[in-house]
Amino acid sequence: MNQQNLLIGDIPGFTPQIGRLVSMMNYVRSTTVNAVADLRVEELDYLPDPQSNSIGALLLHIAAAEAGYQAATFDARELNAEEKQRWSAALELGAKARNEIRGSELTYYLDSLDQVRAKTLEELGRRDDQWLESETSFGNGQRVNNYFKWFHVLGHEINHRGQIRWLRSRATQRR
């Protein structure tokens, strides 16, 4: 990663604050992608114990959560039936994910992340800084703005990236 990618600042096509948010999103995503570089299917599927989630499941969970926030912030709605069907195992994780999310190459997971992110960037490019400040409620009725919601998406990915790094260290010991 070059120095320029470490700057948080303006990005052409985005208003100033949205550009800063996108800068952070780009950096976080690049570190997530680096954390899974060159993993094989068996490493993506690795489970250190019967209660764990795999790296592959966590990658799809990151994508699914972002898709959920797209619906919530861009369309002011919950996921629809088709979206719930597509993302249910990834959103729920646990046994459902252990059974359904397995056997795929890394490109499958990275493509899913890229597809979701492409929509996020397209939608953010249509909005302005005032939209970031727009207030709604969070699930518990607490007042939040769109900026907080997308900050939450970043924190969510960072949290799961930590889990992914831990899982990778165990899965690749078996090489």
Image (tube, rainbow, N blue to C red):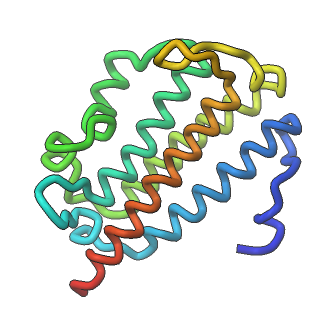
Q: Quadrant of the N terminus?
A: bottom right
Residue at x 46% of width, y 59% of height: 161
Query: Does 40 sit above or below residue 58?
Result: below
Residue at x 63% of width, y 13% of height: 136
Q: Nearer the viewer, residue 101 or 107?
A: 101
Q: Nearer the viewer, residue 111 or 57?
A: 57
Count of labels in the image? 0
Q: Position of residue 166 (x, y in %)?
A: 36, 69
Q: Quadrant of the C terminus?
A: bottom left
Residue at x 51% of width, y 40% of height: 116
* 121 relative position to 36: left or right: right
Q: Position of residue 23 (x, y in %)?
A: 75, 51
* 122 relative position to 157: left or right: right
Q: Position of residue 20 (x, y in %)?
A: 80, 45
Query: Does 114 sit above or below residue 133?
Result: below
* 80 relative position to 73: left or right: left
Q: Position of residue 149 (x, y in %)?
A: 61, 30
Residue at x 50% of width, y 37% of height: 66
Query: Does 119 sit above or below residue 50?
Result: above
Q: Nearer the viewer, residue 125 or 36?
A: 36
Residue 91: quadrant of the picture: top left
* 150 relative position to 131: left or right: left
Q: Nearer the viewer, residue 66 or 123?
A: 66
